[in-house]
Image (cartoon, rainbow, N blue to C red):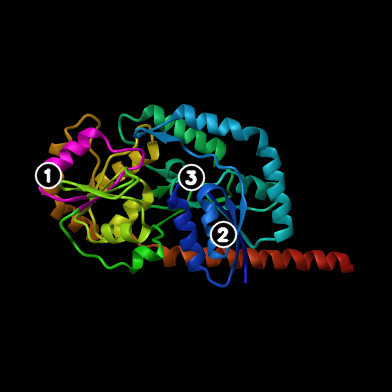
Amino acid sequence: MARIVYGVMGDSLGHVSRARAVAEMLPGHEFLFVGGFKVSDLEQEGYRVVAVPVLGTAIGKSRVSVAGTIAGTLRILPRLSTVIKRLAVLMDSFRPDLILSDYEFFTPRAARMSGMSCVSLDNQHMLTHCRVLPPSGHRISRWMTTGVMRLLYGSSSRYLVTCFHSLEPKDPRKTEVLPPVIRKTVRETPSSTGEHALVYLRGGLPEGLMTAFRKMNRPFVIYGSTKRTMTVGNLTFKIHSDREFVRDLASSAYVVCNGGHSTISEALYHGKPVLCHPVRFFYEQAVNGHLLSMAGYGEMPSPGDDWEVNLRTFEADLGRYRARIRGGKFLGNEIVAERLRELISFHVHKSRRSGATALRKTSS
């Protein structure tokens, strides 16, 4: 049995869902999770969790709040050194065989302080460690996002990047690109093609999009924009329920979402074309939408486009998108698990060799 420290960004469900899926893929190993906010949910499932502050992204009114994000980071700054030292001491006592980080700030730094290496496992590092043709019109958000990532999240020794689209790593010696990790609930839900479209938009539903939905001859099931379940005409608003959300996704005709990696990957796993409406100034989502369009799995309309026209054009091309999706690879669970098992074996073997060398030196 290996001991694994796993730092997880806790500001959204996607990171936590991936971490849970990875832990389920590696039964028999001992996990120590590090993170805040939604990472605490793992404690209820029997995992040990160490709480740390979260350097998250503030979102409001369908756009990234730069001021809110900076303010949140500034509140945490005075505690950075203390948290890193506390984690380093914990790692020294836990003696992990593998340290993972899913876009978590403190874990790689604590690992480095303890003289250990950390493996990054996330989708965000495609922005800095892969050759990606950037979408037009996002120069400022690109510069800010990649700059912050290199400054705050560039401390790992190796990067495993999950992506629904094939990408070339800039340095294959340090970076590997793997298919997405799909959580158990999604894998176990059967696919079908119903009449409704699933809508999941974080940070609010633009009025122009609502108007376009009302004009379509199709029901829309909408998550992320209400605190109670209700139906108004062809629009059904639902409060979040994970199992119901997955059932609605798996049985939908297509998906409308901001551009989060997890939602796109789960939609593609079930063969659903995706129409992206990225949160403004959220560069990663814009890149995901751009990659989606390039692959022919869906579309990302340009800002200012007529949403009704976009929807009708998108629906007319559903057959083409579905055909393209059938040729994709969207389930990387076993590939990722095997890679992690190899890394565990390597680090365990390395530790035993180091221990044997130290023992020989002590004996002599």
Q: Secondary structure at mark 1?
A: loop
In the rendered structure, the answer to whether residue 27 lies left or right of residue 139 reads right
Image vertical order of residue 323 relative to residue 316, above or below: below
Q: Mark 2 — residue?
A: 43
Task: From the top left corner, tell me how far across and down residue 34 is, in percent.
Answer: 59, 52
Label 1 with label 2: CB-CB less than 8 Å: no
Q: Mark 1 — residue?
A: 216
Q: What's under tag 1, amino acid-wise?
A: Met
Image vertical order of residue 8 relative to residue 142, above or below: below
User: Which numbered disc flags the more N-terminal residue, 1 or 3?
Assistant: 3
Residue projecting furthest to the right: 364
In the rendered structure, the answer to whether residue 320 lies left or right of residue 344 reads left
User: Which numbered disc flags the more N-terminal residue, 2 or 3?
Assistant: 3
Q: Residue at x 70, y 61 (%)?
A: 95
Q: Is residue 98 visible?
A: yes
In the rendered structure, the answer to whether residue 198 lies left or right of residue 55 reads left
